[in-house]
Amino acid sequence: MMTNPSPKFLAYCLMILFTVSGPWSLAESSTSGLPRMQPAELGMNASQLELIDGLVAAEIGKGNLPGCVVMIGRRDGIAFARAYGHRQLEPSREEMTIDTVFDMASLTKPLATATSIMQLVERGQVRLREPVATYIPEFAQKGKDPITIEHLLTHQGGLIPDNPLADYEHGPEEAWNNIWKLTPTNPVGTKFAYTDVGFLVLGQVIERVTGQDVATFAAENVFQPLDMQDTGYLPPAELQARAATTEQRDGKWLRGEVHDPRAALLGGVAGHAGLFSTADDLAKYAHMFLACGTKDDSQLLGSLTIGEMSRPRIIDGNERGLGWDSLSKYSTNRGELFSRKAVGHGGFTGTAMWIDPQLDLFVIFLSSRLHPDGVGNVNPLAGRIGTIAAAAITSNECLREEGGIKLIEKDTQDTLLGVDVLERDQFASLRGRRVGLITNHTGLNSKGQRTIDILHATPGVELISIFSPEHGLQGKLDVPNVSDTRDEATGLPVHSLYGETRKPEPSQLEGIDTLVFDIQDIGTRFYTYVSTMGLALESAAEHDLRFIVLDRPNPLGGELVEGPVLDSDKKSFVGHHAIPVRHGMTIGELARMFVAENELQVDLQIVELEHWYRGQYWDQTGLVWTNPSPNMRSLTQAVIYPGIGLLETTNVSVGRGTDTPFEVIGAPWINGSQLARHLNQQALPGVTFVPIRFTPSESKFANEPCQGINIIVVDRRDFRPVQTGLAVALALRELFPQDWDMTKYIRLLANEQVFEAIENGTTSSQLQELVAPTLNEFKKRRRKFLIYR
């Protein structure tokens, strides 16, 4: 039941609002360099923004903060800028002002450290996928050698959140030695674990590479170019005088001195904390970010760098950018209506800043929640203010007119396939060549024209013959062997690579000097089109042929890697190379790996994709889906396939002969309700299971009634298909040990250790731990072959 607020509380709220700075007129400007404008002039609703006053007053009244500064703007100006309450209550009261200086705490990470690192990346002095030990050799101790710069920027390096304060109490030199000796607490690249230590290390990377500490480098290369005059480490006395007070240390109130104890023991300068700034200065940074890295006519960061920093990486169910938060368990200060492009960060002292390129919006919330008693809580308030700000947007006219945001919205341009790029570049790599084309019905350009017809009609390119993979040239056959045929449209011979031979024969290569591969893969190791390419590469090497891959997107994206790595003694046509079940690579990247790791002497050329990024699934490319094989009829089925497909060599139906292959599994001996209940109790990420009955019309248990489960992906961002598939195998082993024959499960799994663990009845989490070492080794192996970011 709601009660009326007390007169005392109402009076307090009125006092708070009385100390709020007034609204800004059009003519007024600020030290931010952005004009103060009426909200309507920026496409925002002023009445909606006025709701912020009541929220802030209520939280001050509850004692969650003594005061704050809120600033909201868009690329063309600031719509809302107000100061509330006090910046100090003890030992004396001081009202909050717009120009109050705040301890940024962990906002230091993106603003100073990550931005500096990305400048070094642009200059070629640092590489994201390079091990940190490249720049700090002593960091490699205790198994930290595989940790990369990108791992640290995204908090997936496996490092402890904070090492003990005692490690810092004998001076910086010993403090760093203690950090170098730390042992990872998680396997690298497997878990999101927020860590100050990682950004401490990144600060040292900056110093090792440039000879300047993070404070000096960021000042000269970030803050000064942006005219952020009140931003930096170790603020001078004039800035300390208008700083918000935090807590007491050794009986002294901290004002303009870093609150973080580790940064303090390192002299006030560190990669994870120590920065001070104001709302106006942060608005300058936000404006630069929204303007694709520019300020006036100068470029602080490239537009692609801004896009890369803000591109979310899905890590253990959390989304993080480079140095920035996107959507994670730490995002309680995030506006609920922000777009998926939004990035932000908070600070322990009570700061938060979010920038949304898609909405053309920034929201700055600065408080000193720790003053005076260290118990304030402001993240929910910051998040609610962000929601109000986003809801206030009435028009995106400025976004559409300026167009600059499109530079960092990576999905605004449709992906260009390798064959599209080949056409655009007038077939430069094929001029004067005699070509054998390895393709099928998926070999289409983005307009739906066959690569066969395009090459056949191109002057200066002689298409000699065609080679087809499993399922034949039309992709309609689901038989053990496919015969040679002839293409009706061109009259050219079609040699089957899924018949008497799986590899181009010398007689089939007569008169050919170039093999071109253009087939759509689905990102799963045991899908045979990749094996066809691998064997064709061997033929090219044996016969001194050029091999050109017309690259295509991995429909499952290129970031996530999952599942057991193939044992070297289990190579087969459904397991050509030692890669995991879900490899996260394009066919072009795989070709580079096959050539290098198999030491093939071949002239390999990749016609690369354009406008494709590793985080994109197929439905984000703008390309039309073509069923790559008879039972792969949708992207949903392709997403599920890496895990459920493993089961189809055993005595269960995986839905062949139904309308939804790989979305269902079953058998006459399965109790669907029991299996669904068992799996749902495990709370596997991004998926739920529904008991069903179905009768396949073909394949396993044709025309026999089956019980089983329908696999429903409820959140693709969290869903892990291989983890899910292994969990289903474990469930079948546990619930139906007499009925499920897992003997042939090894065929596609191709990993003896994991097979034996399932056979012996391990747990899902133990399986993930078992897989992690070889999976991490693969991630290191694949790094050098990746083409796309």
Image: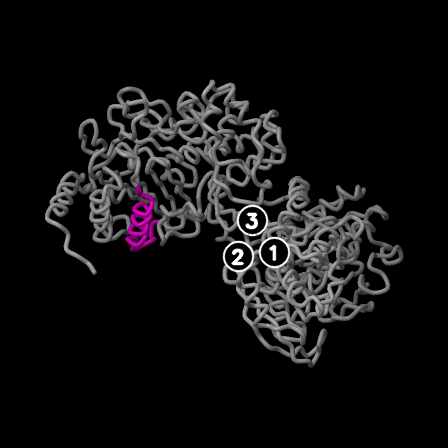
Q: Nearer the viewer, mark 3 or mark 2?
A: 2
Residue 444 appearing in the image: yes
Q: Which mark is residue 613?
A: 3
Q: Secondary structure at mark 2?
A: loop
Q: Are marks 3 and 2 in contact (CB under 8 Å)?
A: no
Question: Along the polypeptide, which appears first: circle 2 or circle 1?
Answer: 2
- Mark 3 burial class by Cα count in 10 Å: few <14, some 14-19, many 20+: many
Q: Position of residue 235 (x, y in %)?
A: 33, 23
Image-quadrant location for residue 391: bottom left
Of helix, strand and loop, which one carries label 1? helix
Q: What whole-number distance in Å separates the C-alpha atoms at marks 3 and 2? A: 24 Å
Q: Nearer the viewer, mark 3 or mark 1?
A: 1
Q: Which residue is mark 1?
A: 723
Which range is magenta?
Answer: 377-398
The answer to whether residue 194 is above or below residue 471 is above
Residue located beneath label 2 in the image:
685
Alpha-carbon span between mark 2 and mark 1: 9 Å
Q: Earlier in the sequence, mark 3 or mark 1?
A: 3
- The x, y position of residue 705, in whole percent, is 65, 80
Name the residue located 63 percent from the left edge and 69 percent from the top edge.
Answer: 665
Name above or below for residue 721 compared with residue 471.
above
For the residues bearing labels 2 and 1, Cβ distance under 8 angstroms: yes
**Which amino acid, mark 3?**
Tyr
Q: Position of residue 270 (x, y in %)?
A: 44, 26
Viewer-nearest residue: 145 or 74:
145
Q: Is residue 33 visible?
A: no
